[in-house]
Image: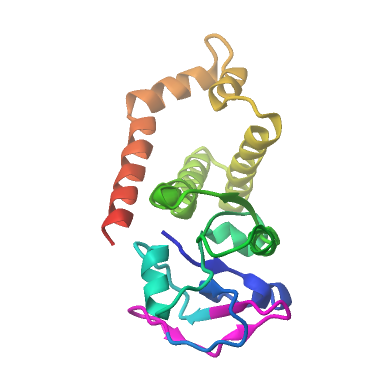
Amino acid sequence: ILRCLVGSEMCIRDRSTTSLLLSVTLIPNCAFTLSLPGAKRSAPIISSAGMMFLPIIPPIIAPGKTLAWLAEKFGKDVKIVRTMPNTPAMVGEGMTAMCPNEHLTEEEVAYVKSLLESFSRVEIVAERLMDVVVSVSGSSPAYVFMMIEAMADAAVSGGMPRPQAYQFAAQAVLGSAKMVLDTGKHPGELKDMVCSPAGTTIEAVRTLEELGFRSAIIEAMKVCEEISKSL
């Protein structure tokens, strides 16, 4: 579960950075040490709003680290926001879950949310759902990349040049996702719109169902969620 921010004000100023922010505290000008395995703390960055960002080098994910765990490391009450972004944030199309602790005001939550919205859609979630977020958006770009790769492989098998195959496959996924978000229609309804009677698509869907496509995704995500809970 990412209790981290990708980007931050540092990223807003310099799009080339890939630093992850382990945590955010609204205590101005407060230096601290917070370590995780494989992480090396750099100098804190203080924004004009008095918000501290802690870039972690190299970039890491910190699943299993709760708000309570982070607060304990400070040794006193601090304002902390846990987040779970994903790699599409690198192109401004991320999905980020955020979970503030009880010490933030509504205005402070709104400010952090506005920072996250500079590179992603943002939803405020209950902390108990952060492991689910890992599986549904944090790790899921990897599943989608695998599907795009497989679609392209099939197109290449049919004679299409690979660069063109990636364009067709990736744009089909991008457009389909946009239809879900923009129309508000159930994914099943959108699927049915493509499946004409006795057509090519319904036969492809039948084969995917026969080979356990839907079940494979669900089971993979449940494993991802359980691993996140155990860390």
Figure quadrant of the N terminus: bottom left
- Say if 2 sits above or below 221 in the image: below
Q: Nearer the viewer, residue 99 or 155?
A: 99
Q: Is residue 39 magenta?
A: yes
Q: Is 20 included in the stretch rendered in magenta?
A: no
In the rendered image, which quarter contains the C terminus?
Answer: bottom left
**Residue 198, position as x, y percentages in the image:** 52, 10
Name which residue lies at 39% across and 68% down.
62
Q: Position of residue 26 (x, y in %)?
A: 60, 74
Q: Main secondary structure of the magenta part?
A: loop
Q: Quick one: 194 or 48, which is closer to the camera?
A: 48
Q: Measured from the top left, where is residue 73 in percent x and y?
A: 38, 78
Q: Seen in the image, is 75 located left or right of residue 13?
A: left
What's the colour scheme?
Answer: rainbow
Q: In this picture, which residue range is highlighted in magenta? A: 34-54
Q: Residue at x 33, y 23 (%)?
A: 210
Q: Residue furthest top?
A: 197
Between 84 and 25, the one nearer to me in the picture: 25
Residue at point 40%, 49% (across, down): 128
What residue do we see at 67% from left, 39% from top? 178
Residue 166 spot, x, y in % from top left: 58, 49
